[in-house]
Amino acid sequence: MKKILVTGGAGFIGSNLVRLLLKEKSSSVINVDKLSYAGNSESLNDLKDMPGYFFEQLDLGGAPSSSSASPKSLQSLFQEHQPDAVIHLAAESHVDRSIDGPGEFIQANVIGTYNLLQASLQYWKKLPVDAQSKFRFLHVSTDEVYGSLADNGLFTEETKYDPHSPYSASKASSDHFVRAFADTYGLPTVISNCSNNYGPYQFPEKLIPLFINNIVNNKPLPVYGSGENVRDWLYVEDHANAIDKIFHFGELNQTYNIGGFNEWKNIDLIKVIIRVADKLLNREIGSSEKLITYVND
Ligand code: NAD
């Protein structure tokens, strides 16, 4: 049974991934999560008593550690659980919050990733040769590091980094640190960059759950600009499956983009959500479009 240390497992994507790893892949999971506002241990209620599941509440951020030291508790956690691999999802993830308070994003996404890399490296260096060669550090990142999607183009793994929000800049920085630890110290890493996810266990401030809630409660639906921004959308369980595939079959030190080939202008997506919700709420189809409010981007 593979023992995987998953960070951010109480979050939206993390909880879906932990469920997949425990229930379908028979892995053992050590879920390391700070339980920030976005972490919800209730998302894992059906798993908490399963054999092979461990939860550790820990903040990966904190003061940057000196050259080889990392936070004591993180190091002792590696010693205690002896994981075969790490899948790193823990992050501050909401773009709007990053505009209001970028510091927390640097702390969690940059310093947090650095601390985890440092602890993983110290642990990996002391593993027996066989375990060392099988060890993986999979860093889960976002396609927002590439900037905005052009009208008819797709991001590729060669697209140049062009982050524009404090969130995407902090994730870009964490990606660079992961590559630096692979190149400089030989830590076996893989990076995945995925587009927007939707599905169960998402925090209600994100676009799709926010709009569904607001339609139900007859509240305004804030649309940035004219709603022409294009995003690709992927169902969260498909992302979890892609992470599992990359984890097992991905080449070391490679980057893999994950997407749904499912691009929507925000305004078109919102109108579809409105039509579906109106039908389910027995309202006149499209009547909730009156809730759309255009706000400055
Ligand atoms: P989320 O905000 O729902 O969950 C993040 C989890 O990380 C929470 O459980 C939170 O408690 C934990 N966390 C935050 N800071 C921490 C810290 N300092 N120490 C320990 N735990 C901490 O996020 P999500 O949407 O599930 O995203 C997970 C990862 O996937 C992120 O790295 C994000 O950048 C990436 N990603 C997300 C999307 C998306 O559409 N949601 C798309 C592509 C990539």
Image (cartoon, grey):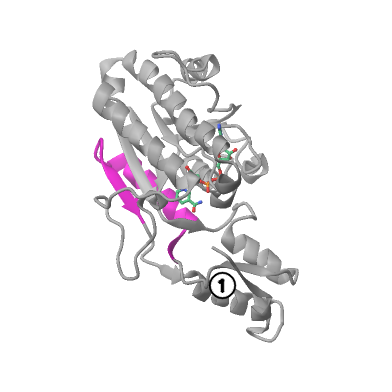
Q: Give the quadrant of residue 210.
A: bottom right
Q: Is residue 148 above or below residue 78?
A: below
| Residue 241 falls inside the magenta stretch | yes
Q: Is residue 36 left or right of residue 170?
A: right
Q: Position of residue 13 (x, y in %)?
A: 51, 47
On screen, residue 198 above or below 110: below
Mark 1 Cα shell of 10 Å, populated few (<14), some (14-19), many (≥20):
many
Residue 53 point in image, percent of width and height? 55, 32
The x and y percentages for residue 80 are 50, 16
Q: Is residue 256 magenta?
A: yes
Query: Which residue type does callout 1 highlight?
Result: Ile
Q: Is residue 198 visible?
A: yes
Q: Which quadrant of the structure image shows residue 3?
A: top left
- Residue 242 in sight here: no
| Highlighted magenta segment, given as a residue range | 230-258
Identify the image quadrant of the N terminus: top left
Q: Nearer the viewer, residue 271 or 149?
A: 149
Between 185 and 295, the one lying in front of the other is 295
Identify which residue is drawn at 48% across, 34% down: 6
| Badge 1 element | helix
Q: Nearer the viewer, residue 219 or 226?
A: 226
Instruction: Tell me: residue 259, above or below residue 280.
Output: above
Residue of label 1: 270
Residue at 48%, 28% in the rendered image: 111
Closer-to-camera residue (187/82): 187
Query: Residue lying farthest front?
Result: 296
Q: Residue at x 31, y 38 (%)?
A: 190
Q: Taking 199 as reference, is 180 left or right?
A: left
| Left or right, 237 with reference to 203 | left
